[in-house]
Every structure is written in structure tokens, then in C-alpha cells.
Amino acid sequence: MKAFDVLDISGDVGIMAYGKNLEDAFRNAAVGMYSLITDLDAIEEKRSIDISVESHSMEGLLVAWLNDLIFHFDAYGFIGKRIDIQEMGDNKIKTMVTGEDFDAERHEGKLLIKAATYHQLKIEKKDDIWEIDVIFDI
């Protein structure tokens, strides 16, 4: 099973992420998002940061978590490569993200992602596979 597909949407971009469970689908959505920002093969696993988010719904949890990852890239230049989900429930996700600081001389800049959105957001289980569709403002 592939981890994700890129959705080409007029004026924006999206990810369709897949997983055998909800944690895998969340992880693949984040990895897919990071792959829109740069080539992940060039990212080294130099340091880790902890990211914890709470929300009122699963959709809200996904959007808030992805936006927190975007914030750490925008504010601190940190881009993740490996995501370890330590705890996940209906209203909370606790993760450790490993990567490094973005270096324009070593890392290819692709898209500047502003935010994960609720537009056409979908989290559903089809047969035995979880699927997440999320669109990003660029």
C-alpha cells in the first residue's frame, strides 16, 4: 500500500493519505505534507521535537496537528522526516517528530504551505484501509 497521493487542486494542493490504522493515516498525511515542502530524502534525522495537540473532533485534531507542524517549519525552520505517534485518542495526539532545520543550500524548496484546511476534509475507513483527504492553502 502506498502512503499517500498528491491531489492537484486549482490554486491549492492536497494529500490523500492511507493507513492500515488511523495512526498510520495521520503519519502519512504529515509525511505527504512535508514532501510538498522539500525532498525528504535530503532531510537528516538530527533532532526531535514533541508535538501534542487536543481538539473537539478527529477532523479538528488532524487540522490542528498539521498546522502545528507547519508552525514549527514557519517559525523555527524545523522539517520532520520521521513521525512517531506516542499517544492518540479521539481528542488528543502526542507525537515525536524527528528531522532537522531546513537549510536552503542543502534542501530543495518546493511549495510554501500556509495551512491545513477543513475544505473537503475527509477521514474515513474504506474496507480495511483508512483514508485522509486534506487540502493545504499555498
Image: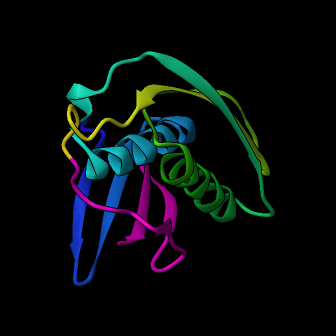
Q: Looking at the picture, does residue 7 appear above or below residue 50?
A: below
Q: Where residue 80 sits in the image (x, y, percent)?
A: 44, 33
Extreme residue toward the front, this view: 105
Asked whether residue 123 is in view, the answer is yes
**Left or right side of 23 for 4:** left
Residue 96 lies left or right of residue 103; in this view the side is right
Q: Residue at 36% x, 37% y: name it.
A: 102
Q: Which residues are magenta?
A: 109-138
Q: Which residue shows up at 48% across the image and 80% down it?
A: 119
Outermost residue, top side: 46
Pinpoint residue 106: horizontal percent, then vertical percent. Answer: 21, 31
Q: Is residue 114 magenta?
A: yes
Q: Considering depth in this image, is 7 or 113 the residue closer to the camera? A: 113
Answer with left or right where residue 31 lies relative to residue 55. left
Q: Answer with the quarter of the image where residue 1 lies.
A: top left
Scheme by which the image is coloured: rainbow
- Give the residue displayed 21% in from the left and 27% down from the top: 41
Q: In front: 96, or 119?
A: 96
Q: Position of residue 93 (x, y in %)?
A: 71, 41
Q: What residue lies at 55% left-to-right and 47% top-to-bottom?
A: 69
Magenta stretch: residue 15 in it? no
Residue 54's place in the image compared with 82, above or below, is: below
Relative placement, left or right, of 68 versus 106 is: right
Q: Position of residue 124 (x, y in %)?
A: 51, 59
